[in-house]
Image (cartoon, rainbow, N blue to C red):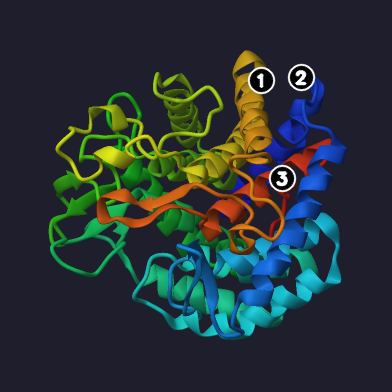
């Protein structure tokens, strides 16, 4: 059955890979996209010059660089961005910078203490394998998939996100993003185990993470023995019942990707509903760069978050753009055009002030004005490495469509 699924997905790409070309006049030119890729490549070289060889960029805050070790969940985004920029510009120096970072990232293949191995390994080593065809690091990806799979439980039917208290068995919506790593490793190894875990996790999340309006909770806490839902909470949003903007992006991207990987119509239906929730929300600004939480207007004046309630989150916008470009390829008519046009609007607005940094500014990060976790007063109104990653990914995806190629390669690995 696995082979049948993958053949189906290839047929989906064949039919819809250039849908936008047939139905929509591109609003962004080849020159515009290439210029922004070239500018991003030039800017990231500034960041590269400031980055210690064994560290990974996190943010630039209060005029200071913030780096992490390889074990931080964001460690794969910087080399991943370098790989995408290499793809978009063919500058050999970017490939060299990316290769150099993988040496320090490789050991995370054995890290069983995090659910973020998709971010850490697939965005970096996965892009490397896709772009070079060199299987030298295939064992790293295989070991990483094994480590990630070790966090899956048949009781909860989901991959555990965190190990710390007060949570029992927490699963965050972000975890949808790590499922592509598993589905791709099933293709790479022929082991259906990874694929089955990814599908089961996505089905469990679909069942428990969403409200009637298709907005997503951030954290679902399960009883590890029975698999029953204990609580529905937030960790980074304005309130337990609010729609944290980046969380909606993880959900949109995750279910769009899982439809691509499985051909399951329930995942496509969910992605379409999530997209409509985002695009129809009365609090989505005209430029489509969302506030950090869609329910920011409900924050009381007594809250410590009140003064910053209207901050935008560029990282969420970049996620929306990349996901909507893909979702437009799997939908039809006015719906497809709406998704595609929204992605174009976001890309255009991210590519200019106040969201895009001037060359040499912003510590070498491409985009400004993201919000990590406002309730924790962490990474507030700063550049973030994953905002740059998904922005560059959106540029590369748009470039592929301009060149009449599938928005996502048919055989990523």
- The image position of residue 280, as x and y in percent, is 45, 19
Position in image of residue 327 (x %, y %): 60, 33
Label 3, secondary structure: give it: helix
Q: Foreground residue, 332 or 252?
A: 252
Q: CA distance from mark 2 to mark 1?
A: 7 Å
Q: Which residue is mark 1?
A: 337
Check disc 2 and report the residue beneath it. 23
Is there a contact, CB below 8 Å, between mark 2 and mark 1? Answer: yes
Q: In the image shown, does 117 or 349 lie closer to the viewer?
A: 349
Compared to 286, does 62 lie above or below? Answer: below
> Is residue 134 among what the camera can see?
no
Q: Quadrant of residue 223?
A: bottom left
3D distance between C-alphas at marks 2 and 3: 20 Å
Q: Answer left or right for 158 relative to 12.
A: left
Query: From the viewer's perspective, is the residue at label 3 or at label 1 nearer?
Result: 3
Q: According to the image, label 3 marks what residue?
A: 395
Asked if one can make out residue 74 in the rendered structure from this viewpoint, the answer is yes
**Side of 265 relative to 393 (left or right):** left
> Comparing marks 2 and 3, which lies closer to the viewer?
3
- Are dots 2 and 3 in contact, CB under 8 Å? no
Q: Decide: few, some or many residues near mark 3? Use Cα within 10 Å; few <14, some 14-19, many ≥20.
A: many
């Amino acid at each position: 059955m696995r082979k049948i699924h993958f053949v189906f997905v290839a047929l989906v790409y064949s039919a819809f890979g250039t849908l936008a070309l047939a139905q929509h006049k591109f609003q962004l030119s080849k020159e515009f996209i290439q210029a922004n890729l070239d500018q991003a490549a030039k800017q990231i070289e500034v960041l590269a010059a400031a980055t210690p060889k064994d560290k990974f960029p996190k943010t630039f805050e209060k005029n200071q660089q913030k780096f992490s070790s390889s074990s931080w969940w964001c460690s794969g985004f910087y080399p991943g961005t370098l790989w995408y920029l290499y793809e978009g510009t063919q500058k050999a120096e970017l490939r060299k910078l990316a290769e150099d970072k993988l040496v320090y990232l490789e050991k995370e293949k054995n890290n069983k203490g995090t659910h973020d191995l998709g971010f850490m390994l697939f965005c970096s080593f996965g892009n490397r394998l896709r772009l070079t065809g060199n299987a030298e690091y295939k064992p790293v990806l295989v070991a990483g998939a094994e480590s990630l799979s070790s966090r899956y439980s048949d009781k909860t039917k989901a991959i555990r996100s965190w190990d710390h208290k007060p949570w029992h068995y927490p699963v965050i919506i972000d975890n949808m993003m790590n499922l592509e790593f598993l589905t791709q490793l099933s293709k790479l190894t022929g082991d259906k185990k990874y694929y089955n875990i990814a599908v089961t996790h996505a089905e469990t999340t679909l069942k428990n993470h969403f409200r009637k309006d298709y907005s997503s909770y951030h954290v679902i806490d399960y009883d590890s023995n029975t698999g029953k839902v204990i609580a529905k909470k937030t960790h980074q949003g304005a309130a337990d019942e609010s729609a944290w903007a980046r969380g909606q992006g993880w959900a949109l991207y995750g279910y769009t990707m899982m439809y691509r990987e499985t051909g399951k119509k329930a995942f496509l239906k969910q992605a379409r509903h999530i997209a409509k929730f985002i695009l129809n929300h009365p609090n989505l600004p005209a430029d489509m760069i969302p506030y950090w939480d869609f329910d920011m207007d409900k924050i009381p004046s007594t809250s410590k978050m009140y003064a910053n309630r209207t901050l935008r989150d560029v990282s969420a916008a970049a996620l929306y753009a990349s996901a909507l470009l893909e979702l437009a390829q799997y939908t039809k008519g006015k719906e497809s055009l709406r998704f595609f046009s929204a992605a174009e609007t976001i890309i255009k607005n991210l590519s200019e002030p106040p969201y895009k940094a001037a060359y040499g500014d912003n510590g070498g990060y491409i985009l400004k004005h993201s919000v990590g976790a406002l309730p924790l007063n962490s990474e507030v109104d700063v550049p973030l490495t994953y905002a740059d990653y998904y922005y560059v990914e959106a540029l590369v995806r748009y470039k592929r469509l301009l060149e009449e190629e599938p928005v996502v390669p048919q055989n990523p690995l």
